[in-house]
């Protein structure tokens, strides 16, 4: 059994989640509940859970604040949040699992199944560290590879290239990282931090565009010397961003 704790300021949300856990996740034993950051920390120290379902927004702080106040994080975390675009993007950047309210039982089961797998404490703490670093600005990203997670600074990514169902990240140090996710997923994540989908197969960091070459769509020369073709329909959007 996975010993779990629910931390949420809304009693209705706690009750609903507990009901779903008892019904759909027979391998999870919820040993206690807490309604805010202060009581959440107390319950974590008392019960030493293996898994914490953690709300993002609470009256006396956020779920991020709670994690920062702990000297050691030796449990898995599944965030449970109302629709908060910034928080959701932060979870994606750090490869942290989250559930949106109202919780979908199917998504709950999937998240718990991941938690039931053995996760190295070092990897878990790295993910949480990245999450906390990204709580104000998106500075780091967790990239899933065949060997595990690779953590890189967003500013060190020059470009990303599609490779069917995978993506190749090209970094400033000339390293290439094969990532087990599609380029579409990273387009959605990185477009808010100065990246642009210049072509269906290429996502570029605008900070590293060295030169634009005219043409039907044209092309850009990146700092690493790569020439990236710009799709005709994406030219206007690119020029607007480059000239502003």
Image: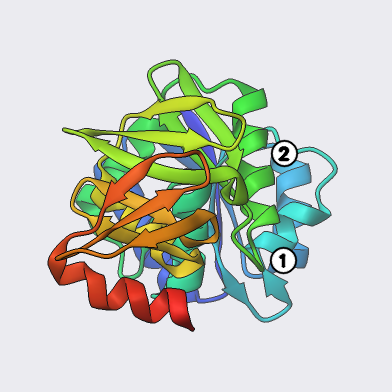
Q: Element under label 2? A: loop
Task: Name which residue lies at 49% across and 74% down.
Answer: 11
State the image coordinates of residue 154 (x, y, percent, origin top left).
57, 50
| Residue topped by disc 2 | 73
Kindly report which numbered mark, 1 or 2, lies closer to the viewer in this rendering: 2
Mark 2 neighbour density, 10 Å: few (under 14) some (14–19) many (20 or more): some
Mark 1 neighbour density, 10 Å: few (under 14) some (14–19) many (20 or more): many
State the image coordinates of residue 153 (x, y, percent, origin top left).
62, 45
| Residue 79 seen anywhere in this rendered image of the structure | no
| Residue 110 seen anywhere in this rendered image of the structure | yes
Q: Element under label 1? A: helix
Q: Nearer the viewer, residue 32 or 173?
A: 173
Label 1 and label 2: CA atoms lie apart by 15 Å
Left or right of 191, for residue 132: right
Verify CB contact (< 8 Å) between mark 1 and mark 2: no
Task: Name which residue lies at 70% across and 37% down.
Answer: 48
Residue, far right? 71
Relative height, residue 60 to residue 212 (above, below): below
| Residue topped by disc 1 | 37
If the image is split into quadrants, where does the N terminus sit?
A: top left
Q: Nearer the viewer, residue 99 or 167?
A: 167
Task: Name which residue lies at 55% across and 60% down.
Answer: 207
Task: Name which residue lies at 45% across and 69% down.
Answer: 192
Left or right of 64, for residue 234: left
Left or right of 132, for residue 179: left
């Amino acid at each position: 059994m996975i010993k779990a704790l629910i931390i949420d300021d809304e009693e209705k949300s706690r009750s609903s989640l507990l009901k779903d856990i008892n019904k759909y996740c027979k391998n999870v034993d919820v040993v206690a509940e807490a309604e805010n950051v202060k009581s959440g920390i107390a319950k974590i120290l008392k019960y030493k859970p293996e898994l914490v379902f953690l709300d993002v927004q609470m009256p006396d702080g956020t779920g991020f604040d709670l994690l920062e106040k702990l000297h050691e994080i030796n449990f898995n975390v599944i965030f449970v949040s109302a629709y908060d675009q910034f928080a959701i993007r932060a979870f994606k950047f750090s490869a942290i699992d989250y559930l949106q309210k109202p919780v979908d039982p199917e998504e709950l089961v999937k998240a718990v199944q991941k938690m039931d797998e053995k996760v190295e404490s070092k990897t878990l703490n790295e993910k949480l560290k990245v999450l906390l670093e990204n709580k104000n600005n998106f500075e780091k990203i967790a990239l899933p590879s065949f060997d595990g997670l690779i953590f890189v600074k967003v500013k060190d990514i020059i470009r990303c290239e599609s490779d069917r169902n995978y993506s190749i990240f090209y970094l400033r140090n000339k390293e290439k990282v094969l990532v087990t996710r599609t380029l579409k997923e990273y387009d959605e994540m990185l477009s808010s931090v100065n990246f642009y989908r210049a072509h269906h197969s290429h996502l570029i960091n605008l900070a590293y565009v060295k030169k634009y070459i005219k043409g039907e769509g044209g092309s850009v020369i990146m700092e690493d010397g790569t020439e990236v073709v710009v799709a005709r329909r994406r030219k206007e959007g690119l020029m607007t961003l480059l000239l502003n």
